[in-house]
Image (cartoon, rainbow, N blue to C red):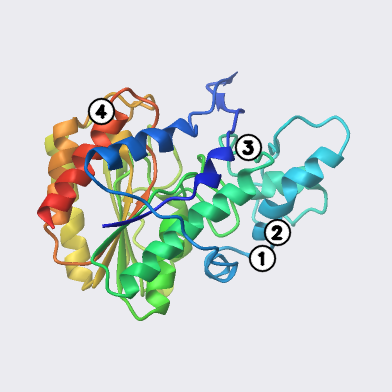
């Protein structure tokens, strides 16, 4: 399996996070990548640095003004008086008649869905380089590879066309799927992170060329709270091409694996010829976000089940935070996936 990782992403070190009304440490830390690379080493996989893919693959998914915001916001923020070290939007628009503001504080609120995605001096470049990993993985698949892994940090599945959220800035899985579709593939995105892939859903909600399937903790009780329900099936041309499979909080192996099997059936019915897997290791019982209670053995079985699929598979990394078991979980999933291939 070809693996892509950009070391420059380690410079993205967000600090601000608001948890239940308290300022807390941000969970999206560079050590995540260190522990994931340790898992790759354990199962004998090396990684390569992706080339700069340019802006075109990103612009196929994200709006020009959002890409400009990510590139310029940290610099312009520091040029203002009285700012903190990171760009944090403190007023988000909620009404449909809202208009796009000129001021940077307003634009920060427009482009940031929550307070989990502060933009620091290295965030824009790190997000670009993570997306480069996804583009390189898609190009390798289009060139004939059977499986690729983009170690994407920051993750991406909460990022919409022009909004960051939930630690995510550029939607790596969506960028990869769009690139594959442009190369003539019929991709499906299967998201198994503990959180609903709300950004991915929004990007493809009106499209029929990419199926989106998400298995996640019930948003009635868990982030992203407002979307991710079973009744959301797409709109217009995309009607029937979005599938959500929410599960109760603290679901264990059997329920999660049953939902995964059902999600793979969705992919087969769609007639996908390529699978983009948004891999969230934060379903594990020890993850600090605490949404599900899947074991390391459950992750191993999931890797085996997905690896048995006949389709080419591109994996993008989503969640999986600093629990002691993170390296073990990544090695269990990816090792079983490779053995099944």
Q: Earlier in the sequence, mark 3 or mark 1?
A: 1
Under tag 3, what secondary structure? loop
Spot occupied by residue 248 in the image (x, y as percentages of width and height): 26, 34
Which quarter shows the C terminus? bottom left
Residue that numbered label 1 is attached to? 64
* Residue at (27% x, 68% y) in the render: 145
Q: CA distance from mark 2 to mark 1?
A: 6 Å
Q: Where 182 sits versus 95, above or below?
A: below
Q: Where 199 sits versus 332, above or below?
A: below
Please give the count of numbered marks on the rendered protein: 4
The residue at the far top in this view is 22
Spot occupied by residue 211 in the image (x, y as percentages of width and height): 32, 66
Residue that numbered label 4 is attached to? 250
Dot 3 crowding, Cα within 10 Å, few <14, some 14–19, many 20+: many
Q: CA distance from mark 4 to mark 3?
A: 28 Å
Q: Which mark is residue 118?
A: 3
Under tag 4, what secondary structure? loop
The residue at the far right in this view is 81
Spot occupied by residue 312 in the image (x, y as percentages of width and height): 23, 66
Q: Earlier in the sequence, mark 2 or mark 3?
A: 2
């Amino acid at each position: 399996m070809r693996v892509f990782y950009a070391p420059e992403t380690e410079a993205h070190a967000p600090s601000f996070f608001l948890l239940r009304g308290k300022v807390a440490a941000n969970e999206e830390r560079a050590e995540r990548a260190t522990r994931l690379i340790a898992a790759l080493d354990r199962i004998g996989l090396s990684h390569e640095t992706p080339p700069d893919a340019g802006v075109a693959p990103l612009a196929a998914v994200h709006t020009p003004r959002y890409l400009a915001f990510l590139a310029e916001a940290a610099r312009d923020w520091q040029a203002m008086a009285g700012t903190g070290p990171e760009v944090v939007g403190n007023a988000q628009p909620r009404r449909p008649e809202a208009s796009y503001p000129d001021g940077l504080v307003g634009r920060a609120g427009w482009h940031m869905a929550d307070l989990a995605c502060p933009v620091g001096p290295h965030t824009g470049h790190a997000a670009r380089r993570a997306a480069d990993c996804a583009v390189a993985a898609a190009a390798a698949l289009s060139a004939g590879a059977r499986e690729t892994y983009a170690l994407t940090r920051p993750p991406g599945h909460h990022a919409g066309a022009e909004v960051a959220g939930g630690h995510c800035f550029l939607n790596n899985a969506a960028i990869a799927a769009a690139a594959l579709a442009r190369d003539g593939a019929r991709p499906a995105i299967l998201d198994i992170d503990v959180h609903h892939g709300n950004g991915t859903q929004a990007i493809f909600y009106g499209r029929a060329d990419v199926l989106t399937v998400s298995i996640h903790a019930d948003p009635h009780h868990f982030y992203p709270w407002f979307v991710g329900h079973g009744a959301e099936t797409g709109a217009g041309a995309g009607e029937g091409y979005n599938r959500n499979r929410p599960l109760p909080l603290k679901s264990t192996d059997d329920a999660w694996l049953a939902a995964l099997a059902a999600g793979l059936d969705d992919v087969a019915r769609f007639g996908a010829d390529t699978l983009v897997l948004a891999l969230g290791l934060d379903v594990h019982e020890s993850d600090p976000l605490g949404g599900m209670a899947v074991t390391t053995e459950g992750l191993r079985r999931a890797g085996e089940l997905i690896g048995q699929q006949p389709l080419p598979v591109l994996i993008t990394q989503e969640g999986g935070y600093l629990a002691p078991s993170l390296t073990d979980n990544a090695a269990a999933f990816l090792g079983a996936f490779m053995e099944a291939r």
